[in-house]
DNA sequence: CTAACATTCAAACGATCGTTTGACCCGTCG
DNA sequence: CGACGGGTCAAACGATCGTTTGAATGTTAG
């Protein structure tokens, strides 16, 4: 039977470590032996609990994406409830949940990097999985943006949202040349990143 | 002796195929056996011509980055020679060379994806290599942007350039949800991407 | 207590990894 | 001509990969 505290269970420890190592070395670059050694569990535990490495990867996504999607849709609904909501409000509803998730848990910061890795993978199976579990959220936000930017035709809007998604992914994953200064906490570093991103993206979308 | 036509030499065939497969499967995900099989050369040829897989990866970058850097700096110099150059001009000087390189050769389109992969790799050795061969170009462009955006302090500017770099990398690598329609050539698809990007980034930088 | 079940474990499976070896081919030059 | 050297080749190296096995262990229910 599963341990009393699911946070410390073998299954959860594997997921947490896998998230970190996938972010650092990629899906192909991080081996199950590295994962299980770092998690201090037996090598066979991965195939026992998840069936395969591929299923483990999907479970790493599912665990965080379910929560992230709920928060994003809730934030979007809250914003749209107000009749006078702005472009910045919708952008914030999209960005802030990712920001908060990356701070409230140990592995959250790693997850945004895993997500960026997934974009780089042109693997058909992984893209379909993400589209199935992610697509409806993007569509809802696209509709919200379309209402606030009636002057843009559909194609133009999609181009710009694509650019926003790219900027967001890379900024959150901390890929750029900006290095967090040692006197700035990771919290306020990401808070600043989000604020800059919202302003920048809003201006770009309105251009 | 090297073959008379260097484009068809074993060495060049390996570089071309490696570029494509690294883009598609990542550095760890593409094996030397896959590369040499696709290039129709012997497995040992990689270690003979490049010494190691790691050195092959660096050579894939070097071959294209040298040319890309030259074109970008030349375009920047041409823009700055005109006293009335705009923000859009500088952005174009940065984006267009990448655009053209991705179209004038078979592997060029793959290279921008390889470059995006490199961003996702937090590998210290690779980051240092890119910084050494890439850093001075980014600094020159940052200076040019700073002159055109005197109202932004240094930190604010760096944040925004970071966002631009992310959006550019992502858009050029074709990671997003925008799928090229079959009736649009790859040439004009990327041309459109560049135009949208310049407009978007200019507005974001001025915000 | 015992039977049944869930989980962990060491060990091994065949496949594939990057790399190395030594023979072999072939154009160049003394 | 023979010696040399750059290049290619099949074969093998040890290491590591994802996965499977079967026994050992722990935990729960009857």
Image (tube, coloured by chain):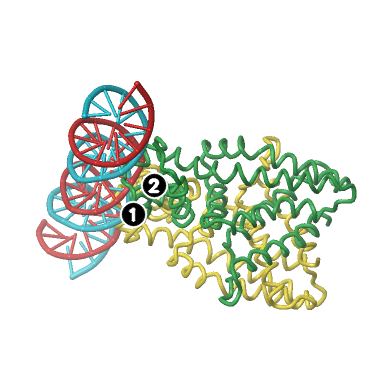
Chain colours: A green, B yellow, C cyan, D red
CB contact under 8 Å: marks 1 and 2: yes
Return the x and y of residue D1 as percentages of the image width and height. 11, 56
Q: Closer to the camera, A75 or B93? A: A75
Q: Gap in Å between the C-alphas at discs 1 and 2?
A: 9 Å
Q: Closer to the camera, B22 or C8? A: C8
Dot 2, how many residues are within 10 Å of its Cα: few (below 14), some (14-19), or many (20+)? Answer: many
Which residue is denoted by mark 2 in the rendering?
A: B35
Q: Is residue B157 visible?
A: yes
Residue name at image x 71 percent, y 61 percent: A197
Q: Quadrant of residue B48?
A: bottom left
Q: Chain of mark 1?
A: B
Residue name at image x 76 percent, y 75 percent: B152
Residue name at image x 65 percent, y 68 percent: A188
| Residue B46, disc | 1
Q: Quadrant of residue A25?
A: bottom left
Secondary structure state at the residue bearing disc 2? helix
Is residue B158 rendered to the left or right of residue B62? right
Return the x and y of residue A137 as percentages of the image width and height. 69, 41
Return the x and y of residue B20 as percentages of the image width and height. 48, 48
Return the x and y of residue A190 as percentages of the image width and height. 64, 64
Q: Closer to the camera, C15 or A12? A: A12
Secondary structure state at the residue bearing disc 1? helix
Tell me which label, 1 or 2, sits earlier in the chain.
Answer: 2
């Amino acid at each position: 039977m599963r341990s009393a505290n699911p946070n410390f269970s073998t299954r959860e420890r594997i997921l947490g470590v896998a998230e970190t190592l996938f972010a650092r070395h990629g899906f192909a670059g991080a081996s199950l032996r590295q994962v299980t050694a770092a998690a201090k569990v037996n090598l066979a535990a991965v195939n026992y609990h998840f069936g395969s490495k591929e299923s483990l990867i999907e479970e790493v996504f599912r665990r965080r994406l379910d929560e992230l999607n709920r928060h994003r849709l809730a934030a979007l609904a809250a914003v749209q409830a107000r009749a006078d909501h702005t472009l910045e409000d919708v952008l914030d509803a999209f960005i802030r949940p990712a920001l908060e998730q990356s701070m409230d848990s140990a592995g959250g910061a790693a997850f945004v990097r895993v997500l960026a890795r997934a974009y780089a993978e042109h693997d058909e199976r992984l893209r379909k999985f993400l589209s199935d579990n992610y697509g409806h959220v993007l569509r809802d936000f696209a509709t919200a943006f379309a209402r606030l930017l009636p002057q843009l035709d559909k194609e133009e809007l999609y181009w710009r949202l694509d650019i926003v998604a790219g900027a967001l992914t890379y900024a959150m994953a901390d890929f750029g040349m900006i290095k967090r200064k040692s006197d700035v906490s990771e919290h306020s570093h990401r808070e600043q990143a989000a604020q800059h991103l919202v302003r920048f993206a809003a201006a770009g979308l309105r251009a």
